[in-house]
Amino acid sequence: MTQTPYGGGTWMSVVLLAVMAVATSPACSEQEDLFAMSLEDLMAVEIDTVVSASKYEQKVSDAPSSVTIITADEIRKYGYRTLAEVLRSAPGFYVNNDRNYEYVGVRGFRRPGDYDTRILLLVDGHRTNENIGNSPLFGVQFVLDVDLIDRVEIIRGPGSSLYGSNALLAVINVITKGGKTLNGLELSGEVAGFDTWKSRITYGNRFDNGLDLLVSATRGDSEGHELYFKEFDDNAKNDDSRPPILIGILGTDPFADAFEPLKDKEVRNRPVVIRRFKGLDEFADAEGRLPARHPQSEQIGDCHVVFICRSEKEHLTAILGPLRRQSLLTVADTPGFLEAGGIVDFLIEDKKVCFEINTAAAQRAGLQIRSQLLRLAKRIVQTDAFEGPNDEENGNDT
């Protein structure tokens, strides 16, 4: 295989320069024609007009702002599919995407987390910034199909004196097509990668009575990019990333299989784990003597909530004593449980389930009981069996 004297890149450069010369020749000719025109002819040359700069129609040359106008013809030629793509083509504008929304910066100003509140977006002069965060929508969330845009007027610089506080960096006014422009029914369809599709039906007409009507409906969907981050898999397998909520049951279990459905449940994306502990009587030695503390106190202390069954009524001090410094919610349905240092005690009165709370014991465990729950409590105890009186009532119930 022989090589030509010109490399492939050089040959392509020559062709490109030739194409550019042909493409620019009409512009050069037009510029020469302008210089050859008389003053009267120059005054007759059509100049683009803008409405948004001063809220009335005026020539771009008379507007007191830096103005860029992007027409429907340019949108069609360059294939812009969203307003964000249209704005990206304007000098001084750049667009960011966080995979949810499009954000526009102007002349280097784009503060993270600002949600473009300093840009005012109008459609035919009507404000479209949403009312909660004052942010405009430039991407696929924009209220208008780009095929219905007649032109986009971009006014740089502050316009707050005319439009309010949002118009600090720029005012963008999207002018829509009229029914007269369409003059009939139009159907449009698009398909693309990632299972992307869009369809549009539009009807427009100008009636004899002067009514200009345009009605359009657009529907589309896209599966989008399927992003995969293996780091999330590692976190999912890491027990420390999603620590389970541990519920302990100590003693003779009166609930049978009542807690079984909780095994497959999650609370705030954390799995629920049920642990059962033997009663203190089961640790008696050959002579029937009981240990001074529950042998599984450390494992019990790892739980978030522990229910102490009635079978342990005689051993509450031996059980609760080693747990008194643990951040643990102790619950029972045993009379005298609160006085022994427990936190929540359930009881039945008039065939209704009620509960009592020991706020001093909860405070000692580092737990905060909400006021709404306290108002529902049948009784509140303010004495901690392990630290003495907590307030001036000295253990009196309130």
Image: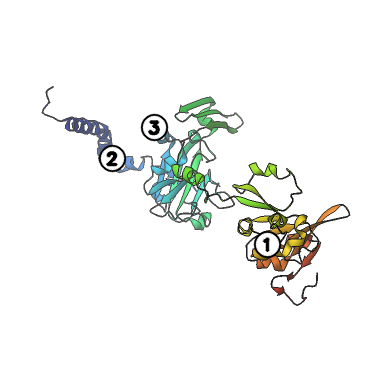
Residue 291: image tag: 1
Q: Is mark 3 on a helix, strand or loop?
A: helix
Q: Is mark 2 on a helix, strand or loop?
A: helix
Residue 50 on image: x %, y %: 45, 45
Please identify the quarter of the rendering in which residue 387 is found: bottom right
Query: Between residues 126 and 90, which one lies in front from this camera angle?
Result: 90
Residue 337 on image: x %, y %: 76, 62
The residue at which mark 3 appears reads as 77
Residue 43 on image: x %, y %: 35, 43
Residue 34: image tag: 2
Q: What element carries label 1?
A: loop
Task: Point out the tag, 3 or 1, that comes first from the N-terminus.
Answer: 3
Residue 316 on image: x %, y %: 73, 62
Please identify the quarter of the rendering in which residue 14 is found: top left
**Colouring scheme applied when the structure was drawn:** rainbow
Task: Please identify the residue farthest to the right as the structure is shown.
Answer: 350
The kind of residue on which mark 2 rests is Leu
| Residue 360 vertical placement versus 53 (above, below) | below
The kind of residue on which mark 3 rests is Lys
| Whole-number angstrom distance, CA of label 1 to CA of label 2 | 107 Å
